[in-house]
Image (spheres, rainbow, N blue to C red):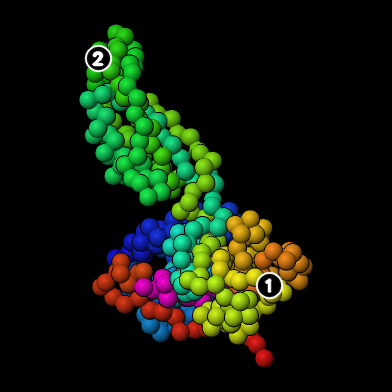
Amino acid sequence: MIIQDVINHLHDLAPLAYAEDFDNVGLLVGDKNKTVSGILVTLDTLETVVDEAIENNCNLIVSFHPIIFSGLKKLTGKTYVERVVIKAIQHKIAIFSIHTALDNAIEGVNSIICDQLGLKNKKILIPQSGTIKKLQTYVPKANAESLRTALFKAGAGNIGNYESCSFNMEGEGTYLGNEDSNPVIGEKGKLHTEKETAISVTFKKHLESKILKTLFETHPYEEVAYEISTLENNNQHIGIGMIGELENAMKTEECLNFIKTRMQTECIRHSKSLNKPIKRIAVLGGSGSFAISAAKAANADLLITADLKYHDFFSAENAIVLADIGHYESEQFTKSFLVDYLSKKITNFAIILSKKNTNPIKYL
């Protein structure tokens, strides 16, 4: 197995196409074609983590956060980022980051928080737009069923809880091939009319190359007529943040203590308690002040996130409780989730969970 095989498994879980534009995800260091000797999973890639990979003969580190976030102009070992990259290169260790691709995945970071709290009726808090595309193509009526089947197999036609979704309309297509043409049906130099079916299917944007490859390989025509458009529909399975409900409503203080225990955090900074029960909870792992308005619009009673500033707490406006549980604390269960996921996909050797606590924040 090579590094690219591992990346493919991670891409199935959280396609990199849905990472935020500001992010730096994917293979940051190393050769994707190298054979894997071992995999170490961590939240952050620090020098101690690279040392841990060396000790365990792991030449691939799967890290949630990217060690290279902004551009590197020098590699002199002056900063911790430079030292990590230099050491990884010296020991031929690859580093892969999944970060906001996993934030936006339906089974990703925020789903993990919801499961840790036992929340029910989970759904995406801020659906990502521009992630759904539509293909329309025209095919001889006799070939319509085989083309539809191939497109469905490639991943097209999935809408929410439904699959094999398409719209079909019959009509007549015309074409006239020039001297360099080689028509499968009809003769070059002669206008041809063919009974055709117009097929429309939607698909997730990261599948576009696969869908087009399938179309060209399956369609009988020498020249395939097709149109691809991007839809503005919200994608209920891709987006950041999540909202769910507690089994039983709690008073604010009781709920905050419950969160503190379940999320294994030493401190929760929060806005003032409200005189109403907490039932509906929004979550956004990592820095999430931008989700306050979305949480309020979704009628959440409480938002769990991290890195809130002083003035962010005023945004609660007596409509919601804001709970800052800490950046590391909100994402700490992610690495165990990734180990479990990869262990089910790769069974011929162990996936190692890093034992290093990379939280840079300490409490008195």
| Sooner in the amino-acid sequence: mark 1 or mark 2 | 2
Judge the density around disc 1: few (<14), some (14-19), many (≥20) Cα neighbours within 10 Å: few
The quarter of the rendered structure image containing the N terminus is: bottom left
In the rendered structure, find residue 113 and report the number of the disc placed on it. Answer: none
Q: CA distance from mark 1 to mark 2?
A: 76 Å
Question: Quick check: can you spot residue 270?
Answer: yes
The question of residue 337 being in magenta is answered with: yes
Q: Is residue 259 above or below residue 4?
A: below
The question of residue 74 being in magenta is answered with: no
Q: Is residue 236 found left or right of 211 in the rendered image?
A: right
Q: Position of residue 45 (x, y in %)?
A: 52, 75
Nearer to the camera, 274 or 215: 274
Q: Position of residue 238 (x, y in %)?
A: 48, 54
Q: Determine whether the residue tagged by mark 2 lies in a helix, strand or loop.
A: loop
Q: Quadrant of residue 257?
A: bottom right
Q: Quadrant of residue 307?
A: bottom right
Q: Amino acid at mark 1?
A: Asn
Q: Amino acid at mark 2?
A: Gly
Question: Quick check: can you spot residue 33?
Answer: no
From the image, tell me which residue sits under label 2: 186
Magenta stretch bounds: 329-340
Q: Determine whether the residue tagged by mark 1 lies in a helix, strand or loop.
A: loop
In the rendered structure, find residue 275 and report the number of the disc placed on it. Answer: 1
Judge the density around disc 2: few (<14), some (14-19), many (≥20) Cα neighbours within 10 Å: some
- The residue at 67%/91% (across/down) is 364
Nearer to the camera, 301 or 70: 301
- The residue at 42%/72% (across/down) is 337
Q: Is residue 297 above or below residue 65?
A: above
Q: Is residue 336 above or below residue 232?
A: below
| Magenta stretch prevailing secondary structure | helix
